[in-house]
Image (cartoon, rainbow, N blue to C red):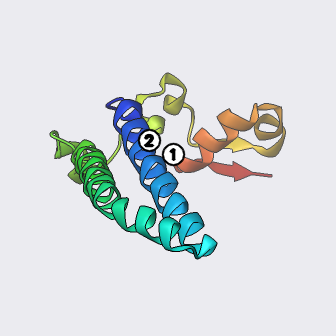
Amino acid sequence: MANLKPLLDAAQKADMEMIQIRDEILRLAEEGTEDSVNKAKDLRSKLDEAKVKAEEANRLYTSVRDASLVNDNVAPLFTAPADPAKDDPKAEAPKVMNRAEFAALKPAERMIFTRSGGKITD
């Protein structure tokens, strides 16, 4: 898996810069003086630049993230997984055993026995 942290950090940093400028504009607008409103208007171009920078950083992060989800080797997606009972040498166990023998088995051995078609007799 690709290390996406540097791209995520850059996107978050760009978002924070945009938010700081936005908050400054809002603070100046709330002051309500002509001077503060003019300062807020002057910050608009800086906010627009920060928005573009944040959008580009976020787009880059999501593009690389989505591309990282693509699997070059698609064969495993269409191939059935191996059956552990067939690969296990214990799978060659007898097909019939009595209940006492079955009870003496470990849980994993019991599972292998029953999944491989084993029968229990009384």
Give left or right: position of 8 versus 99: left
**Is 66 located above or below residue 95 in the figure?**
below
Locate residue 90, reporting x and y percent: 55, 26
Residue 13's disc number: 2
The residue closer to the viewer here, 21 or 97, is 21
Q: Residues within 10 Å of mark 1 (few under 14, many from 20)?
A: some
Please tell me how many numbered marks the rendered image carries: 2
The residue closer to the viewer here, 59 or 54, is 54
Residue furthest front in the image: 34
Which label sits in the foreground, 1 or 2? Answer: 2
Q: Residue at x 47, y 62 (%)?
A: 22
Q: Which residue is mark 1?
A: 116
**Picture quarter containing residue 45?**
bottom left
Give left or right: position of 19 versus 4: right
The residue closer to the viewer here, 57 or 44, is 44
Q: Amino acid at mark 1?
A: Ser
Q: Amino acid at mark 2?
A: Lys
Q: Residue at x 56, y 31 (%)?
A: 93
Residue furthest top in the image: 89
